[in-house]
Amino acid sequence: MLVAINPDNIDKRLIQQALDSLKKGGVIIFPTDTVYAMGCDLYNKKGLNELARLKNVKLNKANFSIICSDISNLSDYVKQIDRPIFKLLKQYLPGPFTFILLAANEIPKLFDSNKKEIGIRIPDNSIVLELVRQLGNPIATTSLHNEDDQIMDYFADPYSIYEKYDEKVDFIIDGGYGRLEASTIVDCTGGVPEIIRQGIGQLSL
């Protein structure tokens, strides 16, 4: 199912349809402030296993990030953050960044792994932020790669996503054309932030 949602005038009824899919353990595709992504309810094991299957990895080997609605509830998912790192997050989020932080004890249990780190995203995109707010907890997520295209790594056109994924996922949100460059990944686990993948986000360290 492909549903168009206007980011400037969000239809709560359509958000509810996407939430219903998430709560049933479905995987959905949605826009971010960078590339399109797919994800599931962080607390739904059926959804996590399906997301891992779609990425052709076992859940305990998956390298998913989580999308939060704001930084106020990060303490539920990551270990205590030093003041300089917290200031950095406050300065750059919401935005096109994935910050790698030390995971709280709950995270490995959710992923059936010994995961010590977790990527945190708070995209500057009203659709996905509304989705996470209404869900009440983060979405586990991974970028939507386009393995069929030799030139472009990611999908930009929601209809192309629909053609490829309509029968594979439960719900696809068309939030307009996506970008073709992913988020900038910043590793904050060593105390000093380090850019490990330069993406669309420009960070001054």
Image (cartoon, rainbow, N blue to C red):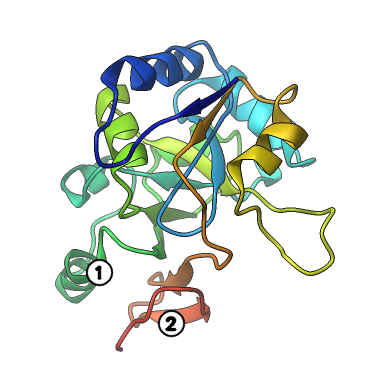
Front: mark 2 or 1:
1
Q: How many marks?
A: 2
Quarter holding residue 18:
top left
Image coords of residue 197 (percent x, y): 55, 76
Quadrant in the rendering for residue 59: top right
Q: Secondary structure at mark 1?
A: helix
Q: Residue at x 28, y 43 (%)?
A: 126
**The C terminus sits in image quarter:** bottom left
* Amino acid type, residue under disc 2 in the picture: Glu
Q: Nearer the viewer, residue 190 or 13?
A: 13
- Residue farthest to the bottom? 205
Q: Residues within 10 Å of mark 2 (few under 14, many from 20)?
A: some
In the image, residue 10 above or below residue 17: below
Q: Residue at x 20, y 42 (%)?
A: 73
Instruction: Specify the quadrant that holds the N terminus.
Output: top right
At a point 47% along the width and 46% down the height, the residue shown is 176
Relative vertical location of residue 59 with respect to residue 63 in this rendering, above or below: above
**Residue plotted at (41% across, 51% down):** 103
Pointer 2 or 1: first along the chain: 1
- Amino acid identity at mark 1: Tyr
Measured along the vertical axis of the image, is residue 32 above or below residue 174?
Answer: below
Pick the front one: 88 or 184 = 184
67 sits to left or right of 111: left
In percent of width and height, residue 23 lies at 45, 14
Q: Circle 2 is placed at which residue position?
A: 194
Say which element carries label 2. Answer: strand
For label 1, the residue is: 92
Which quarter of the picture shows residue 98? bottom left
- In terms of depth relative to the viewer, which is nearer, 16 or 43? 16
